[in-house]
Image (cartoon, rainbow, N blue to C red):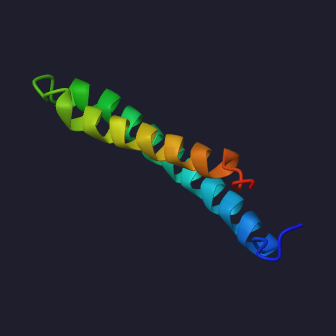
Amino acid sequence: MSSEEEPVGLKIGEKFFGLLIIFIGFVIFYFAYTSYSALSSIAPNLPAIVPGTFLFASVTIIVIGILFVIAKEEEE
């Protein structure tokens, strides 16, 4: 065992933060997807880039959260 081990609370906090980021990403994805469906009936000429930007950002946030959850500490 190394004398400079990472505290257990820090490991748990990192996993919890990752799950929180995943949840926030899914909420953003849900609202961006449902609002795009509603907006397409109201404004058919709306460019797809507007909600697509938020969908892409939410997927990016979800991937970052997954990386936080599956991250392991470096072994020497």
Look at the picture and state if 53 lies above or below 19. Answer: above
Quadrant in the picture for the N terminus: bottom right
Residue 15 pos. (x, y %): 70, 58
Where on the picture, by quarter, is residue 73?
bottom right
Residue 46 pos. (x, y %): 13, 29
Q: In this view, which residue lies farthest toward the right?
A: 1
Quadrant in the picture for the C terminus: bottom right
Of the pair 67 and 4, the residue shown nearer to us = 4
Residue 65 pos. (x, y %): 56, 49
Q: In this view, which residue lies farthest toward the front?
A: 76
**What residue sits 47% from the left and 39% below the top?**
30
Where on the picture, by quarter, is residue 35?
top left
Residue 63 pos. (x, y %): 51, 40
Left or right: 56 in relation to 70: left
Look at the picture and state if 36 lies above or below 20. Answer: above
Look at the picture and state if 69 lies above or below 3. Answer: above
Q: In this view, which residue lies farthest toward the left?
A: 45
Of the pair 58 and 8, the residue shown nearer to us = 8
Look at the picture and state if 18 lies above or below 59. Answer: below
Of the pair 39 and 47, the residue shown nearer to us = 47
**What residue sits 20% from the left and 26% below the top?**
48
Of the pair 29 and 22, the residue shown nearer to us = 22
Number of labelled discs? Answer: 0
**What residue sits 81% from the left and 71% below the top?**
8
Left or right: 60 in relation to 50: right
